Amino acid sequence: MKKTSIKKFINWDVLNKVKNSRFSTNKDMHNLSKFLRELCVNMCIEGGDGHIPSSFSLIEIITFLYKKKLNINNKNLKNPNRDIFILSKGHGCLALYVNLYLKKFITRKDIFEFCKKDGILGEHPDTTKIKGVEACTGSLGHGLSFGAGIALGKKIQKQKGKVYVVVGDGECHEGTVWETANIAKNFKLNNLVYFIDWNQSAMQLLPHDKMVDKWKSFGWHTQLINGHSYMQLEKAIKKVESLQKTSASPSVIVCKTIKGKGTKILEGHGKWHHKIPNELEYTEILKQIKNYNYDR
Ligand SMILES: Cc1ncc(C[n+]2csc(CCOP(=O)(O)OP(=O)(O)O)c2C)c(N)n1
Ligand SMILES: [Mg+2]
């Protein structure tokens, strides 16, 4: 397909305004989601690569964290008491990149160069190239243990800040995930919070049922929510924060999500996992994003 040029498509003035807004209302957050989804699609068209449905599955979780929770900015990276965010499901990184853009970690030029030879934004996030990315991920299953290690380091050094990790359900096929589940509980890592992007797709691999019970059996505090609802995300994190005051156990928020959420054309269709839209599909996807009614 002919490149659409995100330069023309994206209203950068609006985007610049949203960069600094606190986004207090739910409606604002959902409008932001639409805008970020459009940006992701355009980045894929420009770069000729990327995983759109995987990014749409977890975009509310990441946007919620960056807009409402994480005390991370491009001036405090050396502060040992800041929070840490790890996207373990590295192929969902478009959702991370658009948030790093809002937080001014990366520039518009970087966005244009997604998956291009001289660009810093690859198909999976690279900590050696991108400011604000804590870990190279893409090989599934490692972000959790990495996050648990940082959480343990914070405990030993009596540092503040929490560690938040977003994990795909397909990742939970990796044994390291369950080793970490056991270790984190035993080391009393209540400064660790996992979000599972439970879209039940995992590239049509084995399904992961009873996700909540599995984590519960390792002694974690568990919650099950709609991972596309900013209200439920907010409520869940408040509950985690209250538990952290009294309990030593780590927390997991199992988020029911839909792969490709926001566009019926993509939702739940396996063939879209790593596919770039043609011109007709591109137009339809953008139309659907605009008209979508989001979950409250
Ligand atoms: C260790 C490892 N094994 C296999 C793969 C290939 N792979 C890429 S994405 C994917 C499915 C991942 O499922 P999930 O985490 O649920 O992501 P989603 O399909 O929801 O985007 C697999 C198996 C990989 N990246 N790393
Ligand atoms: Mg999945």
Image (cartoon, helix red, strand yellow):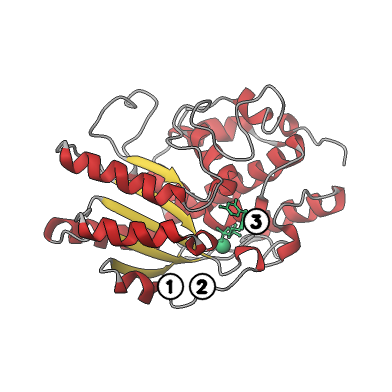
* Front residue (pair 265, 214): 214
Q: Earlier in the sequence, mark 3 or mark 2?
A: 3
Q: Quadrant of the N terminus?
A: top right
Would you call the spot at circle 3 few (<14 residues within 10 Å), some (14-19), or many (20 or more)? many
| Crowding at mark 2 (Cα within 10 Å: few <14, some 14-19, many 20+) | some
The first of marks 3 and 1 along the sequence is 3
Coordinates of residue 284 in the picture (x, y in percent): 79, 56
Q: Is residue 148 above or below residue 130?
A: below
Rendered-image quarter of ligand 1: bottom right
Q: Which mark is residue 186?
A: none
Does mark 2 have its CB less than 8 Å from ligand 1?
no
Residue type indicated by callout 1: Met
Q: Helix, strand or loop at disc 2?
A: loop
Q: Amino acid at mark 3?
A: Pro
Q: Is residue 49 left or right of residue 145?
A: right
Asked whether the beta carbons under mark 3 and mark 1 sit within 8 Å of each other, the answer is no
Cβ(mark 1) to ligand 2 < 8 Å?
no
Amino acid under disc 2: His
Residue 193: where, in percent of width, then height? 32, 54
**Marks 3 and 2 close (CB-CB < 8 Å):** no
Q: Can residue 171 be seen by looking at this rendering?
A: yes
> In 3D space, how far apart are the residues under numbered discs 3 and 2 (Cα atoms)?
19 Å
Q: Residue 170, how many percent across, how many down?
A: 54, 62
On whether ligand 1 comes within 8 Å of the CB at mark 3, the answer is yes
The residue to which callout 2 is attached is 208
